[in-house]
Amino acid sequence: MCARLFAGSRANATIDSRQLRRFKLHRYKWTDLAGYGYNTGIASTNAATRAGTSDLTLYRSNRYTSSSTPLIYNFPVANGAYRVNLLFAENSQPQQAVGARVFNVQLHGSPVLRNFDIFATVGANTAVVEGFNTTVSNGQMIIEFDKLVQNPRVNAIEILPLAHSPLLTLQFSYADGTPVNGTLNYAMSTSLLSVGGQLPLVNGQATV
């Protein structure tokens, strides 16, 4: 299953069988079924994003929450390994300053982005993709955005199965061979796209 969803769309958090069928039918292209799966939040549009992507349409809508209730997306998916790409752009002028918008992101209750600041990461009106690998064992892909400063927001969400995708496993160790523990912060950029994220090091290893 491959899902590509705009985050700003209809204010409807109820998933019926017709929506689920449409969701599956659109699984190989970006769709505006962003009302699918969220618990709260407000849809918004802004066309200010101008850089960092070849598809500006992805960054013209977003969903945010202004309350203390976390914004949570819950997607039914088959059990297995997935790549989750979260698309962001800081195109709201009042938040185009370091520290003006800060939030955390969790996958299945595990932190993947801590104190995330879109503007501090990539600047104003510029797209950035934060990608993470995760495993689903209960048939649910749960993505949570937690408020710290101002309102957490996301422009689009992409969920890709990893069964046939190439993986890069990195090994980190000290000179004496002891595995490095901690968190790997990575960033990769091209003229069209920026991808980055945070992954825990398990026995010195991280799979990107």
Image: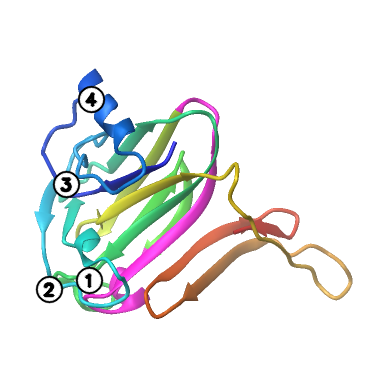
- Is 152 left or right of 76, judged from the image as shown? left
Amino acid bearing label 1: Ala
Instruction: Return the residue nearer the eye: 184 or 58.
Output: 58
Report the magenta residues as a range. 116-139
Q: Amino acid at mark 2?
A: Pro
Circle 4 sits on which residue? 15
**Of marks 4 and 3, which one's residue comes earlier in the chain?**
4
Q: Quadrant of residue 149?
A: bottom left
Mark 1, secondary structure of its residue: loop
Secondary structure type for disc 3: loop
Displayed quadrant of residue 73: top left
Count neighbours of disc 2 (C-alpha within 10 A) and say few if under 14, some if 14 to 19, many if 20 or more. Answer: few
Mark 3 closeness class: few <14, some 14–19, many ≥20 residues within 10 Å = some
- At x 66%, y 58%, the residue is 206
Number of the front mark, 2 or 4: 4
Measuring from the top left, give residue 189's x and y in whole percent.
46, 76
Q: Earlier in the sequence, mark 2 or mark 3?
A: 3
Q: Mark 3 = which residue?
A: 67
Q: CA distance from mark 4 to mark 3?
A: 23 Å
Tell me: residue 19, above or below residue 105. Answer: above
Do the residues under discs 1 and 2 have CB atoms within 8 angstroms?
yes
Residue 82 placed where, x, y %? 52, 43
Residue at mark 1 = 100
Q: Quadrant of the C terminus?
A: bottom right
Mark 4: amino acid? Ile
